[in-house]
Image (cartoon, helix red, strand yellow):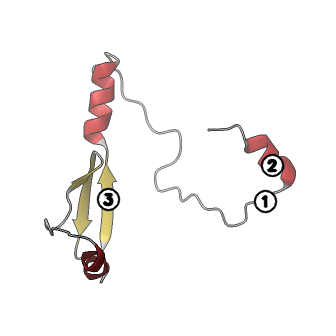
Amino acid sequence: MAKSQLGASYEIKDLGEVKLILGMHIHRDHITGDISLSQKSYCKHMLRCFSMENCSLKSTPLPPGLLLMTEGYSNTLEEVDKMKDVP
């Protein structure tokens, strides 16, 4: 549907299922409907740029599978002011 709507206004070319976009590899599991993104190539490139290809591996600072949500988050003026300069 989106493709036909875009095609009505723009000249488009269907190149098939996307595998790579903006440096991210995309994997789709058609059975479960899951989509995963990987920036492995970008990470390796950055490690090379900073001569860290042989650095030691460390686990992530957050537990695997943690879901981050905005539900239940309080947006008081104080919190908004506190976070305005946080990237």
Cα–Cα gap, marks 1 and 2: 8 Å
Q: As displayed, is residue 6 above or below residue 48?
A: below
Tell me which amino acid carries mark 2. Glu
Q: Residue at x 32, y 25 (%)?
A: 47
Q: Residue at x 78, y 58 (%)?
A: 75
- Point out which mark residue 36 bears: 3
Find residue 8 and report its horizontal and vertical position in percent. Answer: 27, 80
Tell me which amino acid carries mark 1. Ser
Q: As displayed, is residue 22 above or below residue 50?
A: below
Q: Earlier in the sequence, mark 1 or mark 2?
A: 1
Find residue 73 and report its horizontal and vertical position in percent. Answer: 73, 60
Tell me which amino acid carries mark 3. Ser
Relative to 54, 79 lies left or right = right
- Point out which mark residue 74 bears: 1
Closest to the observer, 70 or 9: 9
Q: Are marks 3 and 1 in contact (CB under 8 Å)?
A: no
Quarter placement of the C terminus: top right
Q: Which residue is mark 2?
A: 79
Cα–Cα gap, marks 3 and 2: 32 Å
Q: Secondary structure at mark 1?
A: loop
Dot in front, 3 or 2: 2
The part of the image, by quadrant, that contains residue 57 is top left
